Image: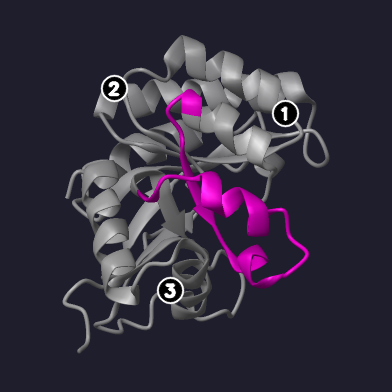
Amino acid sequence: MESSFPYIDFHTHKLSSNEERITAVTSIDPSELEPPPNNLYTIGVHPWNANTNSINLHLNNIKTYANSPSMVGIGEVGLDKMKGPRLDIQQKILEKQIEIASEIDKPVTIHCVKAWDELLALKARFGGKTSWAIHGFNGSQELAKQLLDKGFFLSIGAAMLNEKSKLQESITQIPVNRLFFETDTTDVDIAQIYAVVAVKLDLSINDLRKSIAENFSYFFRR
């Protein structure tokens, strides 16, 4: 029997097909003139696009969009040592967006590449006021434990379908009540990720859909 709980696509850059079985959260940039119609969305300046010249305009746009009931969080924002401007610039802009998240009481979706120490330091300073999630997590069991111990949710994507991915081991260490799934920029069906994880965790698809839907309600307060 089909579950009454939808598949949750926690983070995508594509507009939802409006399938009844899927609840998707689209990530948009504050430079976009209009938010996506009929879609839940997060909004934030990606670390690759961190630019001090335009940040005030973007921050104002974020605050304006915060009044929409479809705007559910700040993201994707974060730190990336492999791409984008200098890390100090990225960190300055991330801090400003975290401050907004605290002001408007919205959760934060994080992009992080090789900047875990810096991110954890920020979490210690700012993270107690709202929920944070790492999108596209594809790390080791040790990193998963470190992040979970600090209160993060972890969202995993198409890498879960790769048998050589570190996720094949670390997924078993992530409590179901701290877990999300996402398609990000891929064409993967979110149901495929659910199916693989359900086998790994020895859960039924229905039970897994229920758990992730409950996480969604808690994280986004919906």
Q: Is residue 52 above or below residue 215?
A: above
Kindly state the secondary structure of the residue where label 1 is placed. Answer: loop
Q: Amino acid at mark 3?
A: Leu
Q: Which mark is residue 115?
A: 1
Q: Residue at x 47, y 55 (%)?
A: 28
Kindly state the secondary structure of the residue where label 2 is placed. Answer: helix
In the rendered view of the protein, which quadrant contains the N terminus? bottom left
Q: Residue at x 27, y 67 (%)?
A: 207
Kindly state the secondary structure of the residue where label 3 is placed. Answer: loop
> Circle 2 is placed at which residue position?
103
Which percent across, then down, holds residue 4?
Answer: 16, 77
Name which of mark 2 and mark 3 comes first in the sequence: 3
Q: Is residue 199 magenta?
A: no
Which percent across, then down, holds residue 55?
Answer: 56, 30
> Circle 3 is placed at which residue position?
15
Name which of mark 2 and mark 1 comes first in the sequence: 2
Which percent across, then down, holds residue 91?
Answer: 64, 22
Give the magenta part as a residue range: 149-176
Distance of label 1 from label 3 (alpha carbons): 29 Å
Name which of mark 1 and mark 3 comes first in the sequence: 3
Q: Amino acid at mark 1?
A: Ala
Distance of label 2 from label 3 (alpha carbons): 28 Å
Q: Residue furthest top?
A: 125
